[in-house]
Image (cartoon, rainbow, N blue to C red):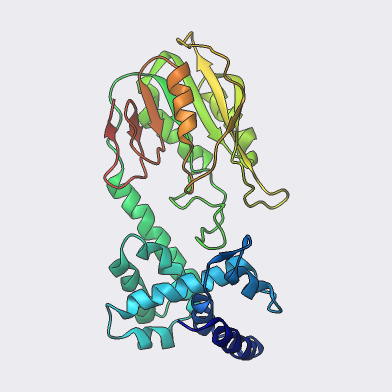
Amino acid sequence: MLSNEELRKYISEKDKLLLEQNKDYWALGELAFKVEIKKTKGESKFEKWCKEGRKIEVNTARRWKAVYNYGQRVIEVVDDFNSLKDNLSFEHFACVRGIAKKDLNKSIKFLRLSLERNYTVKELRKEIRNMEIQDLLANISKLPEGIFQIVVIDPPWKYGTEYNEDSRRVASKYGEMSIEDIKKEWKEKIQEHIDSNCVLWLWVTNAFIHEAYHLLEEWKFEPKTILTWDKVRMGIGVWLRGQTEHCIMAVKGKPLINLTNETTLLRAKATTHSTKPEEFYKLVDKLCIGRKLDWFATKNRKGWVSYGTLEKNGGGNND
């Protein structure tokens, strides 16, 4: 490990040269990696390095470092790393880094495929997205069985934008569905399993509130109230940066509900993409009586039947 004095000298001379020339992101990632990340009076040396005369966003530098670290993992298992590095861009490696969290070999396979087929970064992202959708379809749960008195629906609303793990997460990572696709799926696979007395919880983002009410009208559910999820920290957005998501509570017939003093505000930290907070499911378990179906679930959950689950080898009856 370099001493603080050696580190300051090394960084001040090398990163100035790198930033003045064509940015060598691999070298910048190495520089970021060499900076100690010990907290000193509330601010890390890493953050200071980004701020002091370099005008680098901390998250950008962290990304350089993360991709550099991924490269070091690849070096340990392949003999042709230099060939991959010389013929593919830094962004190609950034694209597959997320895959490596679960399967390093699969990420390397995508790098070699990019080299073989001369993929652009955009083409590589499309290939990865297609793979994720196919994995989802391969692991999708069986059709639900029986009748349900409670249904939670978290549709993959169609934003029409490209998902990018590092910079563009507003789109669904798992494949989007148009309103017509959602209607068709409901009619062909869900409708016959819905009790005449049922509570439906429909998750919706700000962009699709209008469409959500049209779905409820077509499905003959009467909206009763809206639960708003405060994610505690703000996220991304075009006009205003989003910090909330909404869930419309609607009913059909006269379902059994254990009304308490729950409010229309749910405050819970957001976790992974598309995953709804456990506090929400605890609320539904507390209020609603009957068999529960989670459509477009992100995981299996005890006491629920998951359909269209995104969890590998997921789905099936867990009630």
Q: Position of residue 269 (x, y in %)?
A: 54, 41
Residue 196 falls in which quadrant of the image? top left
Question: From what the image shows, is residue 271 above or below residue 259?
Answer: below
Answer above or below: position of 147 versus 176.
Answer: above
Indicate whether 132 appears above or below 51: above
Q: Residue at x 49, y 10 (%)?
A: 253
| 189 displayed left or right of 268 | left
Q: How many numbered discs sit on the rendered protein?
A: 0
State which quarter of the image contains the C terminus.
Answer: top left
What residue sits 51% from the left and 84% below the top? Answer: 27
Task: Identify which residue, 251 or 284, lies in the foreground.
Answer: 284
Rendered-image quadrant of the N terminus? bottom left
Q: Is residue 208 left or right of residue 255?
A: right
- Where residue 110 appears, x then y in whole percent? 35, 71
Q: Is residue 18 left or right of residue 165?
A: right
Rendered residue at 33%/59% (across/down): 102
Q: Residue at x 64, y 88 (%)?
A: 16
Of the pair 300 and 56, the residue shown nearer to us = 56
- Residue 234 percent across, percent down from the top left: 64, 48
Residue 34 appears in the figure:
yes
Instruction: Quadrant for residue 228, please give it.
Output: top right
Does 236 appear above or below 85?
Answer: above
